[in-house]
Amino acid sequence: MKLVVPDLISNSYFPVVAAADLGFFRREGLELDVELLFPVSEAYQSLKAGSVDFVGGSAHSALAAFPGFAGVKLLAAQAQGMYWFLVMRTDIGARRGQIECVRGRTIGAAPWVEMGLRALLAQARIDLARDQVKIVPVPGSQGAGVNFGVTAAKALEEGRIDGFWANGMGTEVAVRRGVGTVVLDVRRGDGPKGCFDYTFSALATSEKLIAQSPQIAAAAIRALRATQAALANDPGLATEVGRKRFPPSEAELIAELIRRDAPYYSAAIASSAVSGMSRFARAMGILDRELNYEQVVASEFIPLWNEPVAAAWPGGS
């Protein structure tokens, strides 16, 4: 079986990557390979086509392939809240929370990810045309196998963009190199009211898989929850995965990023998260009506979110 994520050298979808590499999927009886497939719209299109079994990606992006969420369901959250950062070039001199610094600037962002930035700028009364804000693909991000956040940090360092809207790994690389300043960290309270609930990192599968093999969907949720608990208990486990998947410099950063993310590790999908995402999707023009909870979430698996988990690392036994 196959699970795809749209960014690999990243903390965004790390729980499902770690579930594979640390043996948690295997412990639940799943032989599940995790691969990179960028952009996220392509990942969900592959789910619709049946060439992959699961997607670990942004929740709202399921709409790229499944209009109105018809044919897809979210099984669980990998973590709570919108998880991208607005980072600007250090020499611009922007301060934390100074969202107006984007005026007259060029910001790099990935397809579908950029919607989160557009929505919060609109909510902050920044008009892209009037305020001359350009949101563009990050230079160099179109090639197969490219990891977006790290590529964004490189483009920022080279002065090819003024800022980026991307994941925590790209943010950490830019900050540590002294080329980027964090302006917005939505998950930790920055940005306009309600932007936390625009989207979240989710584990999704097709309604077909749920109907035909509900035990496989349940096993994937159990493995994800156990991985979340294990990483929260011991973020150092992330280094084991990083050294297998990442370049050496990023491999040594991932444990610290996971330590920061651990407070947001919960598989539960709240009704407020679905409502917030639905409002956001309507504002972005990718949804034409409010969705109810059961249209988005595989609610039959909700009891699994609260089951006791075996968090011990299978590789350590």
Image (spheres, rainbow, N blue to C red):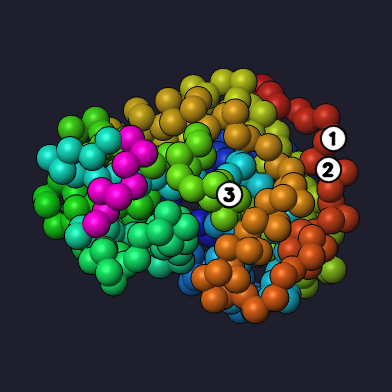
What amino acid is at disc 3? Gly
- For image coordinates 24% across by 57% down, the residue present is 103
Span highlighted in magenta in the image: 96-103
Left or right placement of residue 277 versus residue 166 in this view: right
Q: Which mark is residue 304?
A: 2
Say if the magenta span includes residue 101. Answer: yes
Q: Are marks 2 and 3 in contact (CB under 8 Å)?
A: no
Label 3, on which residue?
Answer: 194
CA distance separating discs 1 and 3 = 29 Å
Is residue 170 visible to the viewer in this orientation of the structure? no
Of residues 254 and 185, the one drawn nearer to the viewer in this rendering? 185
The kind of secondary structure element at disc 3 is: loop
Residue 65, compared with residue 304, is above or below; it is below
Query: Few, some or many C-alpha atoms within 10 Å of disc 1 (few <14, some 14-19, many ≥20)?
Result: few
Q: Are marks 2 and 1 in contact (CB under 8 Å)?
A: yes
Q: Which mark is residue 307?
A: 1
What amino acid is at disc 2? Leu
CA distance separating discs 2 and 1 = 5 Å
Of residues 203 and 251, the one drawn nearer to the viewer in this rendering? 203
Residue 279, compared with residue 76, is above or below; it is below
Is residue 74 visible to the viewer in this orientation of the structure? yes
Residue 283, compared with residue 307, is above or below; it is below
